[in-house]
Image: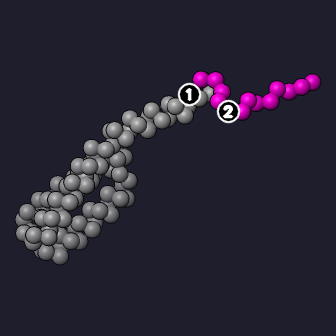
Amino acid sequence: MDVPKPKKGRGSQKEQMPSQKSHRVAQRKALQNRPRRSAARTAVTAARKAIAEGNPDIAKAAFAHAASALDRAAKTGAVHANNASRRKSRLAQQLGSIGGP
């Protein structure tokens, strides 16, 4: 008795659905994550500039804002939690070098 061989190439729509759905989900998540990552990057850049200026009070406020933005991005998965923690740690070290926290 002959056993039918699986078809090569494109199958039915049902066979294609998981990859199409995962593509749609990935696009939607990218749209949701982009502003969170962008806000975190902007806040970190502002904090670095404030630290470079050398004013501890302004730098401390900018650091707090950057840490908050990184925490929000990590909470939603826009950035990895370890990545956010590492960035906050490095910012805190830079802030400590000018007499911060």
The residue wearing badge 1 is 17
Residue 57 location in percent, x, y? 7, 65
Magenta highlight on residue 5: yes
Viewer-nearest residue: 2 or 36? 2
State the predominant SS element of the stretch in magenta. loop
Residue 83 lies left or right of residue 62; in this view the side is right
Amino acid type at mark 1: Met
Residue 24 location in percent, x, y? 45, 32
The magenta span reads 1-14
Q: Is residue 23 above or below residue 93?
A: above
Residue 8 lies left or right of residue 36; in this view the side is right
The residue wearing badge 2 is 9
Q: Is residue 34 above or below residue 17?
A: below
Which mark, by number, is residue 71? none
Mark 2 or mark 1: whose residue is earlier in sequence: 2
The residue drawn where x is 18% and y is 73% is: 96
**Residue 75 shows up from this direction:** no
Residue 64 location in percent, x, y? 17, 57
Locate the N terminus by quadrant.
top right
> To which quarter of the image does residue 4 belong?
top right
The reply to whether the C-beta atoms of the residues labelled 2 and 1 are less than 8 Å apart is: no
